[in-house]
Image (cartoon, rainbow, N blue to C red):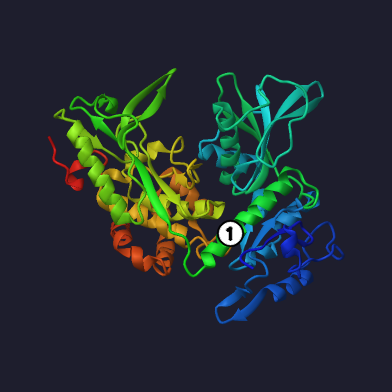
Amino acid sequence: MPGAVWVWNGAAWHAVREKDAGQNRLSVGRSGLGSGQPDDKIWMRVNRQLYSMNDQGDRLIPGILDAGINWPAPEGRTGAHAQKKDPYKAFGGTWILNDHVPDYLLLSDEERHRKLTRAGIAIHSSAENPGRLFRVPVFHLEALAVERIRRRVGLEGRQMVAGAPGGSPGTGGKGSVPESWTEADPLYRRITRTAVRALYTLGLDIGEVEVCVDDAGRTAVRRVELPPPPDLAGGGVWSAALQRFAADYDAARGAARAAEPGPLRIGADPEFVLLREDGRVASAARYLDPRGEAGCDAVPVGRRLLYPVAELRPAPADGPAALAAALQQLLRRAAGRIGEPGLRWLAGGMPVPGLALGGHIHLSGVWLSSRLLRTLDSCVAFPLALVEDPAGLARRPRYGWLGDFRRKPHGGFEYRTPPSWLVSPAAARAAFALAMLAAHETWTLGARYGDLPSEQEELVQAYYAGDKAALYRGMEPFMNRLAATPSYRTLAQWIEPLFDAIGHGRTWDEQLDIRHKWRIPVT
């Protein structure tokens, strides 16, 4: 069985798909659980079924429980439940979706707000007028629907104005928001993006997020709730999402276990800026075609779109060296079109105050999962933060927040958290190699609860605060773990120069012209 998915509702494991139900040897009744609390004796029996012991500790028996979803019933959301060390945390090798629920339940409202604010997410105060209010159910990086919440005296009415494929149809009367909303609508994208981002920031995979929208179209989070577990046979948006997730997981695990998994492709669209001798930015649109491979990116300024930033768009490649070579060719092409003397070409996080630059990395041939995103945060964002110019810290949290991604219409996705690593070929190749390592080792890194640096609160705080000393203390053992993975051997030649720079405390300089290190003639 390539990959089965099960739901833990506080009392029993239930197979999501009927085809896996025959494998269900773990279903446990509620007798003896009391108030939905897991019973140690029951869990000992479950663990005996799940694990075989060896000298390295617990090891999952393949095919019994590949992925679990922690979806406790409402009566399980108590302080006592949260304070108990949930046994599913010890399921070595098993991916447990929503595994941070116990930690989340222990947080005060103030602590939850602090996490969201730190990541650049606005919080709506209960004393303020919420404007338009929406409820968004989110399951594993997917907004399942958008429901308009209509406020009346003493109650709130709900109207679904949009739904994802497999969701419920719209209900209720007409409102100020179109019922035919799609992802093409900018406001719809902002609402759903805020909801998905909020859950990810709080360490959750499943939840309902209330999002406020003011008259200017700005979003803020009003509330995050944990929904009750669904009736797996009852239909609805949650059940449909579970079925899609189970099918996707089955395919992803089957591909990962195949003797010859599908090819992983990597692409990128890094940005750089042209700076005049007087410190003013020269608009890249004066020299480059906005749609070209060596082109420029739009920045909204009021009601206008300006194109001050240059952007490279190479074709995807199969490895770091090939992609870096393609970038070098595009830099040469750009140099042939930018003939003005006296310009400096700058990259990094924020080489010019107020102008943030990104180094988005595109991946295809790998399943986008929250586990992969947290692995990318740990393998790519954190190491790059250790070598970035101190000026790059100003890019966060408006940009550079952890888990920033965007699905691509042609397949695959872009990881948008990193700054522009175009400062040097070595930094670029290291970023590509670390992203590929994260994709290859998603199922081996972070196999146990809290193993990934991006799941550790003190390291997340260090990342957003720019505390490199604290971040390095947490990252040093993880970098040693990366070096022990099977994929590291083929990628080490590009990763080790970056790790060496980290170990010696070296950082890149965002004020240096990138053409020197890329061997592009300077006019």
Instruction: Give percent across and percent down for residue 76.
Output: 77, 53
Snapshot quadrant of residue 38: bottom right
Q: Give above or below for 463 relative to 496.
A: above
Q: Looking at this view, is 473 or 41 the one in front?
A: 41
Looking at the image, residue 219 lies above or below residue 7: above
Residue placed farthest to the right in the image? 31
Residue at the spot 19% in from the left edge and 31% down from the top edge: 338
Quadrant for the N terminus, please.
bottom right
Mark 1: few/some/many CA within 10 Å (<14, 14-19, 20+): some
Q: Amino acid at mark 1?
A: Ala
Image point (38%, 48%), residue name: 267
Q: Position of residue 112 (x, y in %)?
A: 61, 42
Q: Is residue 60 visible?
A: yes
Picture coordinates of residue 381, whole percent (x, y): 42, 49
Relative to the observer, which residue lies in front, 175 or 273?
175
Question: Secondary structure under badge 1?
Answer: helix
**Placement of the C terminus among the 4 image quadrants:** top left
Asked whether, in this view, residue 415 is left or right of residue 314, the answer is right
Q: Which residue is mark 1?
A: 251
Quarter of image, res 252:
bottom right
Is residue 98 something that shows in the picture? no
> In this view of the protein, which residue sits in the foreground, 134 or 117?
134
Vertical side of 452 occupied by 312: above or below: above
Q: Is residue 147 left or right of residue 58?
A: right
